[in-house]
Image: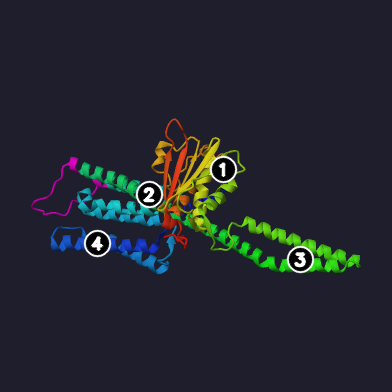
Amino acid sequence: MSMSDTAATDFRLPRRQVRLDTILRLRWLAALGQLAAIFIVEQGLEFDVEVAPCLAIVGFSALLNLVLQVWFNPMERLEPAFASALLALNIVELAGLLFFTGGLQNPFSFLFLAPVLISATALPIRFTIALGMLAVACASALVFVHFPLPWDSDDPLVLPPIYLFGVWLSIVVAIAVTSLYAFQVAEEARKLSDALAATELVLAREQHLTQLDGLAAAAAHELGTPLSTIYLISRELEHGLEDKPQLAGDIKTLREQAQRCREILAKITQLSSSGAPFDRMPLSALIEETVAPHRDFEVAIKVRIAVAGTPEPVGMRNPAIIYGVGNILENAVDFAGTAVEVNAWWNAETVEIVISDDGPGIAPDLLKRIGEPYLSRRPGAEEGEGPRSGLGLGVFIARTLLERTGAKVSFANRVFPDHGAVVQIVWPRNRFEVREPATELT
């Protein structure tokens, strides 16, 4: 499993919870608004209102708020079922108030939308559907059963049935459409937040590996000097003890082991692509480091580096660039039929890397959305076949990391009759050669 898949497993589809304090604030706001409406209609407009049952409903709501605030920690995050139960109670309380104040003739009947919208942004979809059905059921009952609308007794308001049906239908449509819209917006925000968290995890891992790489090179450099001294002294001792074969044999063994340690440290130095954590590397070395892990596969990788009139750009050994370019190259190898091409060139203003393959290319419906989190259509992904199935975080992470370093990443398909995907990565040269890698995520 790749790092991006691991991150996706950790971050995708988190439990959705809302704080008790949030719902209590909304309930207190609703109670105060209901009291104000009752007072204005009764005292200000001097309409005949069923004050006692309305105040009883508002009083029950306020009493429940006090109990919840005293017995529970307001900062506690509620389980979705408990939160949806409180929102359902809001719907029932509103339905009770509307029952005594005219049903759907009351203009405040559109407040049925509020609890459903809150659920759409904070709770799982099944609870939102249940609350929406409850709100529709309450609105439907109020069409037929309700007290008269508080109005002037000398000139009573009589609304035609077709108008009431239109009000009911508008409430139903508004609940469905606005809830779906709110849910989609909140879901996209959650996905983006989760994907950025996974990106931070991947970048932290790459930085850690880079630090280990530099530490290994530094250790090899520091240990090289004393081992060389041990090797030289042991060789001199071996020559000086030729008349004592037993001691000479031990000294020879010591010299051979010291030489073996020197060879091991030399290999570590060769494997480490940087001699210290802050070494700089030319563009050709960057490409070679990202290509090397994929050379043993059946897909041939052709690297072409154009020789320009300006010196080769040299930048920091930035883990974000290494991971981003490496991930895009890995995708190209996965989808390629027989070959992948990596072309690089530069001038005084820009540095460009183009990675292309001879695979099926990017589906037209995905081409404009490529790079979004959790967008994946790998061959065999539907059946979950091995490494070709994924959650679609890899390209998003690669694109995010590369753009953080100043690169512009674009995706396209080869022009017919050729086939395959083409990924173009372009940096302003001054950003590529910056001495401090940009790795922080906001």
Sequence order check: which comes first, mark 1 or mark 4?
A: 4
- Of label 3 and label 4, which has the lower sequence position? 4
First to last magenta residue range: 141-163
Q: Position of residue 267 (x, y in %)?
A: 67, 56
Residue 381 picture location, percent across and down: 52, 39
Dot 3, crowdedness within 10 Å: few (<14), some or many (≥20)?
A: many
Q: Position of residue 408 (x, y in %)?
A: 41, 50
Identified by mark 4, the residue type is Gly
Camera-nearest residue between 144 and 257? 257
- Report the amino acid beneath label 3: Tyr
- Which mark is on residue 128? 2
The disc placed on residue 387 is 1
Which circle, 1 or 4, is nearer the viewer? 1
Q: How many angstroms separate mark 3 from mark 2 (CA)? A: 75 Å
At horizontal 18% and vertical 58% (from top left) the residue drawn is: 49
**Residue lying farthest front?**
309
Q: Nearer the viewer, residue 312 or 14?
A: 312
Side of 277 where 101 appears, left or right:
left
User: Which residue was labeled with disc 4?
Assistant: 33
Left or right: where does residue 227 sit relative to residue 56? right
Residue designated by label 3: 231
Local packing at callout 4 (Cα closer than 10 Å; few below 14, some 14-19, many 20+) is few
Tag 4 secondary structure: helix
Query: Which label sits in the foreground, 2 or 4?
Result: 2
Q: Height in image: 407 above or below 222? A: above
Q: Nearer the viewer, residue 350 or 365?
A: 350
Q: Amino acid at mark 2?
A: Thr
The CA span between labels 1 and 4 is 57 Å
Task: Compute the Cα span from label 3 to label 4.
Answer: 88 Å
Q: Is residue 144 visible?
A: no
Which is nearer the N-term, disc 1 or disc 2?
2
Residue 317 lies, in percent from the top left, at 52, 58
